[in-house]
Structure formats: structure tokens, C-alpha cells
Image (spheres, rainbow, N blue to C red):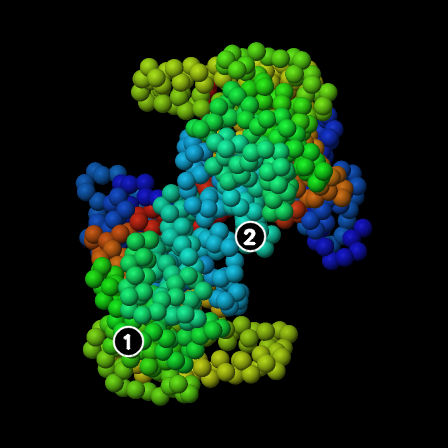
Amino acid sequence: MNDGEEPLKLIRAARLIDGLSDKPLTGGAVLLMGAKIAAVGPQAEAAAGDRIEVFEYPGATVMPGMVDCHTHHNGFGDGRLGDDLALLPDEVLTLQSARNARVSLFSGVTSIRENGPKNDTMFRLRGAIEDGREIGPRMVLCGRPVATIGGHMGYMGSEVTGPQPARAMVRQLIKEGADYIKITATGGSTKTSYPLLPSFNRDELTAIAEEAHKLGKLTAAHCTSTQGIVNCLDAGVDMIIHCTFRELDGSYVFREDVAERIADQDAYVNPTLHVFRALVWDFLRLRESRKLTPREQADFDWRRSQLDHALDDCRRLLEMGLKVITGSDSSWGSYQLGNTVYETECLVAAGMSAMDGVKSVTGEAAKSLGIDGVTGTLEAGKEADVIVVGGNPAEDVMALWDVKEVFAAGRRIDRGSPESLAATIQPRMEYG
Amino acid sequence: MGRDSGGFKLIKAARMIDGTGRPPLERGAVLVEDGAIRAVGTEEAVAPPEGAPVQEYDYGDATILPGLVDCHVHLIGIGDGRRGDDLTTLPDEVLTLQAAHNAREHLYSGVTTVRDCGAKNRTVFMLRQAVEMGVTPSPRLVLAGRPLAIIGGHLSYFGIQATGPVECTAAVRQLIKEGSDFIKITASGGSTATSFPLLPSFNLDELTAICNEAHKFGKHTAAHCTNSQAMVNALDAGVDTLIHGRQVEPDGSIVYRPEITERIVERGVFLNPTLAQGKVGMDRLAAKKESVGLSDAEETELDRLKGHYYDTTEHFARVRAEGVRLVCGSDSAWAYYPMGNFQAEVEAHVEVGMSPMEAIVSATSDSAKSCRIDDTVGTLAAGKAADVLIVDGDPSKDIKALRNVSDVFLGGGRVDRGNYV
């Protein structure tokens, strides 16, 4: 099976999760040949020869590298607004992105979908990675998010008006290297935007989605109100991000009919629960140090209600059988890259089984990005994106925090000192 | 990332070299308080105040030194042999990523201060901003930003080409506005394809304007000079550091001119001979010859480099004997010299006749003086920043011991050299 000079690596652990099956395989083994998976399970175990390097992890689980469907590599996750982030020079944003790329890779995330950086910063980083001067996860990039004038993340550099300019922008981004098209279909945290109102008109959205699909690219849209979701479904968008069921007056009204349309159209939902929880944690932390001002208390109450609604809505979507995946939205708000598992935890808290949680950040996540032919599961022929975690995440999703080893495209990643890794983990707060 | 957590730290080892040139002190110790050196001396003499909590580091048979100061780096360089003309075609974001990579390599190898002698556009200023934000680790940065060059002159592709005293003055003001700590001038051509290494570049009125304007704002100057006429011009204009500094005539021959050496000594100008640049190039080809053999062109190049290195070593041994202060600056990551190997330059200084201790002075306190930051770093003395290097063995006996880095402190913070984040 190894006719070339490709090095073979055999990874052995107590069990194996392949990212497809509902049950782990006991006595798991994966054979890596160069950058690819050569065999999984008993076939891998049967491989023999002098040129095999064996990696043993007793008691641990070998599984696919994690796939985070929603990242902001430019971000700091220190609470600063996107409006302020975008003021930084591109070179500084690129350096931060490189740092975030290492942090996410070291945390066991071997693929990411970046959801909207400034200018060409992520294309530059990817170029440096491809030239071998930087390391990072496999990257699915949008380049810049497509926004209306003053719309959410318009400051990242791609504001358009009207169907023709929207099509032109899609073509421009794809020319620059975009793998999918990110749209902000409602306002958001951007100061000059309106989170309860749709941003693009339907003809613009349709033009974007059509042009993207024509050129073989998927679309994903930020939607923090129900009308935004409906418009995206009309336009044929492939992934609904945030998926907040809020009326124009700000009231939360779960719309089962809209949720059914999402299911009927086979669209994915990325609920981004922890980015809300992280803001709640900020207030809990502040409250430990001093009494909140009345204004802070009001903000805190609002953030809690936002999180509770998001968890409730996610629970309903899961009960209806919608396709929900892990996309952390870090490093946005107060949520930092390297902590993707917080989002998976939240999905489990909203009703996923631990194993479904694992799939939501591996096989299902890869499907939602259209990269399941390449990564996301342990199958012969796929890229050797493999991690080893302590314990059994199929029983307790918290095991995903205990990453013992990371292989990306067959290469064992030297993750550096334990202290430097520990410093990237954000402390947990209790919120009941 | 080497941030100091505050409080007292006591660093002890079998010996301490303070960087002034004084002989090593047996059982030396450095007391650090809140990022600065509070006291230096023998283990018995140095103690924190009674009852104060102190973190102790005892390195056994090792040597405590000041963190190394490399007075000549090119942070955006890759060190894989590509020419500056080609390097400069990379996007600024990619060059900044490379600068961050190099800064980390150098810091982890024991260099706690670098002077960057020329980068493209704003790249190194952007690195500094990111370092200040905690995005990436780095030695202390003394930055030129873009070098001042004539049209088509050496390093002119980095973004400044000035003609005439007025443009030169404006360029100096612009750089200082952007954050330059000193002004780098290319006073002769160099490896740049459109430049002439055997000829001077700027005229004397231009060079004088640059130096006057820089000095007016309290900034020093350093000039790339690969021939004698460029050195004479730079000395006339009042340049503070001469870089490369071989005495070469327009026909390429080395002709020793004692009056140039005398002026360098008399004016107290520093000379950064960039010795290892030639040596690493030579070693690379010699290794290739051993492993796979050389083409005719490479064979010729190796002979040329050998001759060049021999001439250079002889020349600088002579210059040094006349009293010129040679300062260690690696010129990495230019040409084939990657960063993280400043030690090669320090070792080359021993080859031109310095004692290991003299080479250490040249790579610490003298180098810091040439960068005008000797009030902060370069020696182990009370009041200075706690930039401390610990190496196994005794580099005052064998300079190669500088490679055995055991620990690095930057501003009192222990650098986690296993931090790849």
C-alpha cells in the first residue's frame, strides 16, 4: 500500500471516533501515509513494516481534527467592537490572524471557516502558510463579508448597492481567492447598522447567492432578525448564522414556519451560543470585583435574556431535526480563538447528545462547508487531519478540551510549552 | 511572552559577566525588581530586602550575561539567499509576518535588543505596534523604518528615494514622525541591482543634511558604506556608525588608508563590519561542495568568498589594532544568513583578534552604545532594564558557549522559549 517513500504513522488509542458513526470504535487505530489517511480501524492496525512510526495514546480517543465553521481571525476577543478592530492597520491584523491561526490549530481545530476579515489580510496569511512560513488550520475564506453601505462589517471593505455591483463583488472576491461568500443580511454590532432590520434587499441577496452558486461557492449569512432569515431563504442562502428569531420591534417570537423552511431548504444553522454566553460571563466577572452600575445591570439583564432566547431557540431547532453545527464566532466580542469547544458545549446544553456535539464540530461541520470530501472524518483517502483527546468525548463532550496531540495533513504539530497553551484557554464562569 | 510579573527575582550562577569588559565575577547574582536590575554582585552581596518575597533562579555551572544586542538586523529578511530586489516584491503583510517570525527567533536565541537597519514601507513599525499590543514576542526594537537611498540606490525599493538636501531633510522628518529611532543611510551602492557598490551614492550636501536633521531631533545615524569614498563622505557628514566599512577603491581593490582609520578613531565612530555575512555564505557553499558538489560558477563564487573573507579578516584585525571600536551586528536575515544565529557574528569577531571577552563587550555594551540605548541595556548594572541571558559554560573562555542558551529574561520577565503561540 505504500509504494512511494511517504512516511507512515500509526496512531493507536483506546477508542476511535470517525465523525460519521454513532458509536466509537474500541481499540482505535489510524494509519497516516504522508498527508493522507491510509487506513482506519483493523486495517490500520494490520499495517506492518519497519518504516512505521507508532504513536500510542492509552486511554485516549483518536478522532478527526475539529472544524470550526465560524471564526474571526483578525479579532482579539477582548471585548472591543468590530468598528474599533477595523481601525488597526492591515499588517497588525495579519499578525493577529497568524497568532490566532496557531492558537486554533494548537487547540485541535484543523479547519476553519473565517467569517469576515478586513481587506486582504486572510488571503495574505494563507499565502504565507502555503509558502511554508506560517502554520495554521486548513482555511475556508470569504475574504471580506459583503455588506450594505454602513451595514454590519461594512468597515471590512466590501460595501455594495444593487444587484449588479453585488454580483461584481462576488466575482471580485472569488478572483482574490474566496472559497465561499459571507453576507451580512441584517445589521449587527456595527455602530452604523440596524440589527433588527434586514440590510440587503431581496434582489441584491438573490444576485449574491446566484452568482456564488454559479461559480460553485456556498453562501452564509449573518441574520439577527426573522426578516433577515426569511430574505435569505428566499435568496437560497446555504447557512443561517446566529438565526435569531426577533421581530422588528425587538420581541423574540420563535417562528416554526420559518424554521421548517430552513429544514426544507436543507440549510445549516450556526447558532453562535457561546459568543452570547461570553458576554454574560464578562458581567459575572465584573460583578465579582464590584457592584454593577444600573446601566451595567440593565446590559447584563439584556445579555442574559439574549443567551436564554438563543439557547431556547436552538433547543427547538434541534428538536425539529435541523442541521446545526459548531461555529464559534471567535475571536469576536469577548470570545477568543482556541476555545471552540465552549460553543460545542453550548450545543450539547441545548439538547445535542455528546456524540452529536462531536459530529457538529467534525463530520457535520465539514459537510456544511462543502469540504467533507477532504476532511472532517477519519476515512481512508481523506487528508490526515487527526487529533487525540483524553477520555471519551462521545460520553462527555468536555473531553474535547483535553487535546493530547494534533496532526494536520499528516504533520505532527509541535504545540510548544504547556504554559503557553494554558494561557490561551479562557477561564470558565458558572451561569445557571 | 516575557512580561514581568513584578516583585523580586534573584538570578544566580557560577559566574557573571557584566558586559563592561571586567573579568567574570565568581558566584555572581543579579537582583531584579519590577523589571529593572536593582543590584549586581557576588551571591553574598546581593540580597532582597529582609522579608520580601523573592523568586530564585539558580543556574549552577552557567554564566549570567547581559542580553545580547544585535545592532544590525533586517527583520523582514528571509535569509534563504533571495535578493532584496526580490524580497521587496512580497506584500507588506507577508513581510510583517516574517518580521514577527525573525523577532521571535532572535529573542529565543538570547538577543534582547535589535536595531533594524532597513525595512520596507511601514512593516517594522507595524511589528512594533503589534508587539506593544501583546500579539507577538520580540526583543527591544530600535528601528530605522525605511533606509534613505538615492534613486536606484541600495535598498531604495524599501520606499524612500531622496534627491537633494531638501528632500533628504523632509525624508528624515517623515521617518521620525512615523517612529524612527535612528536614520539609516545607504551611502554607497550595494547588492541592489540598480546600484553601484564601489561608488558613493549621496553627495556630501545630502549626507550632511540628513545627519544634521537627525541629530537636531536627537537621533543617530548609521550608513552603509562598501567603499572608501563613501566612508570619507559619511565621516565628513558626521555619521555615527559605519556599516560594512571595508576600504575599497573604485576598481575593487582594498587599499588601506590610515587617515580614514584615524578619523574613525578620533571621532569615536562605531564600525559594524558584518563579518559573518561572508562566512555563512562561504560555509554554505563549502557544505554543498562536501555533499553534492558545486557547479563551476559556484566554485568561482566560493573562491571569491574565501578571498573576500581572508581580506576582510585581515583588514579588520588591522583596523581594530588601530583603535576602531567594532560593534557586533549580524546583518541577518539578509542574503543567506537567517536570524536566530547572532552568535556567528560574535564568533567572527574573535577571528579578527578579539578575546572572547572583548567580543562579548562588542555584542553587548558597545553594541548598545552604538544604538544609543546604553542607558537602558547592554550591561548588568543597577538601574538598567533586566535583560539577562544565562548560558551554560563560560563564554569568556570559549565564545561558542554563547550558543548554550539556558534562559532569557526580557525586562525582568522570563521568556518562555517554548511559546509558539
Residue B353 lies, in percent from the top left, at: 34, 78
Q: Which is nearer the eye, B153 or A344?
A: B153
**Above or below, B391 relative to B324:** above
Q: Chain of mark 2?
A: A
Q: Chain of mark 1?
A: B
Residue B322 lies, in percent from the top left, at: 26, 82
Q: Amino acid at mark 2?
A: Ala
Q: Which is nearer the eye, A316 or B280?
A: A316
Assess disc 1: are there few (<14), some (14-19) or many (≥20) residues with their C-alpha within 10 Å of its C-alpha: many
Q: Residue at x 53, y 36 (%)?
A: A159
Q: Which mark is residue A128?
A: 2
Q: Residue at x 34, y 51 (%)?
A: B409
Residue A206 lies, in percent from the top left, at: 66, 30
The local secondary structure at tag 2 comes to helix
Q: Is residue A411 visible?
A: yes
Task: Say yes or no: labels 2 and 1 on the same chain.
Answer: no
The local secondary structure at tag 1 comes to helix
Q: Residue at x 42, y 87 (%)?
A: B251
Quadrant of res A322: top right
Quarter of the image with the N terminus of chain B is: top left
User: Residue beneath label 1, please?
Assistant: B204
Assess disc 2: are there few (<14), some (14-19) or many (≥20) residues with their C-alpha within 10 Å of its C-alpha: many
Q: Residue at x 38, y 43 (%)?
A: B133
**Above or below, A401 relative to B309:** above
Q: Amino acid at mark 1?
A: Leu
Q: Which is nearer the eye, B161 or B279?
A: B161
Q: Which mark is residue B250?
A: none
Q: Is residue B388 visible?
A: no
Quadrant of res A133: bottom right
Q: In the picture provided, is B75 more to the left or to the right than B413?
A: right
Quadrant of res A223: top right
